[in-house]
Image (tube, helix red, strand yellow):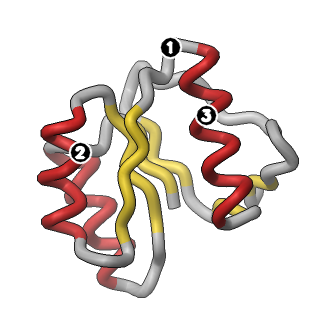
């Protein structure tokens, strides 16, 4: 699971629910202090990736991190305004 803009609010609540159901996932956001707080709230099944979804280099780093660790993403919760996800770095997104 990947949630963008997920370090606060409803998107973080959604991440928490997925993790409570057994998922593992990543919270993506721009502010490290909020990401750290989100991971503390989510526990060991949650991880943070600091990235601005409008910056291509950040997207490449995010995709590389996901491809290295999981190779597969079942759920993407994209906060409104976030770009769409596409296949990159050999990472498959469930359809």
The residue lying at 23 percent from left, 36 percent from top is 32
* 69 horizontally vs 9: left or right: right
Q: Earlier in the sequence, mark 3 or mark 1?
A: 1
Mark seen at residue 43: none
**Residue at numbered disc 1:** 54
Cα–Cα gap, marks 1 and 2: 18 Å
Q: CA distance from mark 3 to mark 1?
A: 13 Å
Give the residue number, with chain letter if any, for mark 2: 35
Q: Residue at x 14, y 66 (%)?
A: 41
Determine whether the residue tagged by mark 3 lies in a helix, strand or loop.
helix
Q: Which is nearer the eye, 64 or 84? A: 64
- Quadrant hosting residue 85: top right
Residue 46 in percent (x, y) is at 36, 67
- Which residue, given by chain and number where applicable, does mark 3 sit on? 61
Left or right of 79, for residue 90: right
Q: Which label's residue is closer to the chain start, 2 or 3?
A: 2
> What is the quadrant of residue 93 in the picture?
bottom right
- Residue 47: percent from the left, percent from the top? 38, 60
Where is residue 7 shown, x and y percent of the image? 23, 44
């Amino acid at each position: 699971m990947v949630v963008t803009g997920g370090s606060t609010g409803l998107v973080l609540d959604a991440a928490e629910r997925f993790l409570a159901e057994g998922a593992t996932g990543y919270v993506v956001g721009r502010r490290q202090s909020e990401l750290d707080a989100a991971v503390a709230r989510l526990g060991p099944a949650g991880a943070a990736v600091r990235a601005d979804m409008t910056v291509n280099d950040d997207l490449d780093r995010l995709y590389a991190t996901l491809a290295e660790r999981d190779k597969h993403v079942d759920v993407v919760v994209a906060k409104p305004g976030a770009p769409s996800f596409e296949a990159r770095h050999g990472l498959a997104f469930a359809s």
